[in-house]
Each structure stands twice: as structure tokens, then as C-alpha cells.
Image (spheres, rainbow, N blue to C red):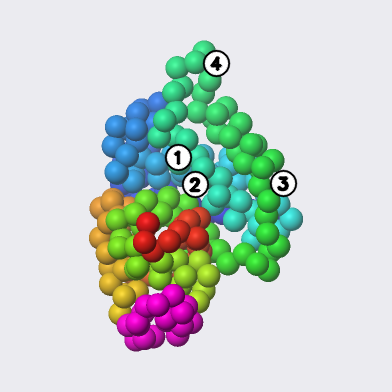
Amino acid sequence: MQTPEIPEANHPLIKSLSHYSDQELLTLLQRHPDAGQYFTALYCRYSPLVYTLIRHSARSPVQADYLFSITWRHLFHELLGLDLSAPGVTLQSWMINVTALCINQAELPPAEDIHYALESSPPPLQCFVERALDQVSPAQRLMIVMAQTFRWSEPRIAAYLQAEGEHISAAGVKSQLQAGYASLEAALPEDIRAIYLAGGKLENHLQGGQPTPKATESRRD
């Protein structure tokens, strides 16, 4: 199992941060949580280490990529409140410990049940999509999750919603999905759009993997 390429490391926004120390990047991330470049820079810096630890614990590349994604989503949330002031604690040692914890606690599904492509839906994009979903209307959010996480067709989504008492057609679902994707993309940080979308559509990246772990979230939350 080879360590995957990290093409975003070559983006000018990320290359411009290469001279910052781990602590400086962490401080910038915590001071500017709505900017995506600082987390992405840490992701690029530590992905080889994290993936090397993970690949020895997964039975297949598909499972390794899936666990890699789960681990980085956990790291993202922990980094926002991380304090490295304790003696002897470095970001590298912390990364190793948290990655090991994620490996030990993970219950990986069989490879055939995983629908995730690391190259099209990298963890930093997933993390900020998950956050941006909170800014999409509840109905559109539910449709996006059903379409992308559960791989449901528009007629199936419409049938489900109709059974729940909603009056909507498959064409109506398609229209709402398109509006939802547009709202979701607009809610992403500008630097994340610059790094990952580059003129492409967010929908194409969501097709590479589950956009959010909140799959059972109600549209009326």
C-alpha cells in the first residue's frame, strides 16, 4: 500500500505556508477557524505519517483510505482546541497518539461496502463541507445526505419524502439538490474553494465519498 499523493501541497496557498512551524500553523488555525488553508497545510505536512501508521492496520487500500478520512476528521475537531504547552508534547507525537487511538477504536466496514475515493474527496474538503452543511436548509441537507451518503436516486428520495408527508416530485428533488449544492459551495471558505474546486463543481467531489457522518440527521433539526 503506497502513501497517496497530496496534490494540494503544491497549491500556492499551501506552499506559501511551508515556512511556518507546527505551532504557528496551529495558532493560525485556532485564531481563524473559518479559513481552510491552515488545517490543509497541517494535513499536507502530516498525511504521510498518518497514512503510514494506518496502512499497516487496514486489510485493503479502500479500508485504509476510509480510515484515513475518519482519522483526519477527528484530528480536525481536536486541533481546534489543542494546547501544546505541556512539556515534551509536540504536534508530531500528538498526531501519532491520536492516530493510534483512532486505529484501535475503528470498526471498519467491508471494503465492498465503502464508497469513498480519497483523490476526489480529500479530508480537508470533507471537514469543511461537513461544517458548511449546517448552513444549508434542513430539507436540502437531508436530500444531499440521501443522495451522496446513501446513493439514493432522485425518484427514491422523492418516494421517501412523499411517505413522510411531503408533496415533492423527482424533478422537485433534482431542483432542490441543485440549489442545495450551490448553497453548500457558497458556504465553504474561499480558500477551500480555491484549493479544491478550481472552477469545478462541488457535487463532483461529493460523489467521491460521504459528505458527512451525520447521516441520520433530521431535516427539521
Q: Check disc 2: other Cα within 10 Å, few if <14, some if 14-19, many if 20+.
A: some
Q: Amino acid at mark 1?
A: His
Q: Nearer the viewer, mark 3 or mark 2?
A: 2
| Residue nearest the viewer, comparing 209 with 197 | 209
Q: CA distance from mark 4 to mark 1?
A: 22 Å
The outermost residue toward the right is: 59
Q: Nearer the viewer, mark 4 or mark 1?
A: 1
**Which of pointers 3 and 2 lies earlier in the amino acid sequence?**
3
Which circle marks residue 77 in the picture? 1
Q: Which residue is mark 4?
A: 88
Q: Is residue 185 above or below residue 171?
A: above
Which circle marks residue 73 in the picture? 2
Is residue 159 one of those drawn in magenta? yes
**Which of pointers 4 and 1 lies earlier in the amino acid sequence?**
1
Q: Amino acid at mark 3?
A: His
Q: CA distance from mark 3 to mark 2?
A: 20 Å
| Residue nearest the viewer, comparing 68 with 146 | 146
Is residue 24 one of those drawn in magenta? no
Q: Which residues are magenta?
A: 154-173
Which circle marks residue 164 in the picture? none
Q: Is residue 213 left or right of residue 134?
A: right
Q: Check disc 3: other Cα within 10 Å, few if <14, some if 14-19, many if 20+.
A: few
Asked where in the image residue 174 lies, by quadrant, the reply is: bottom left
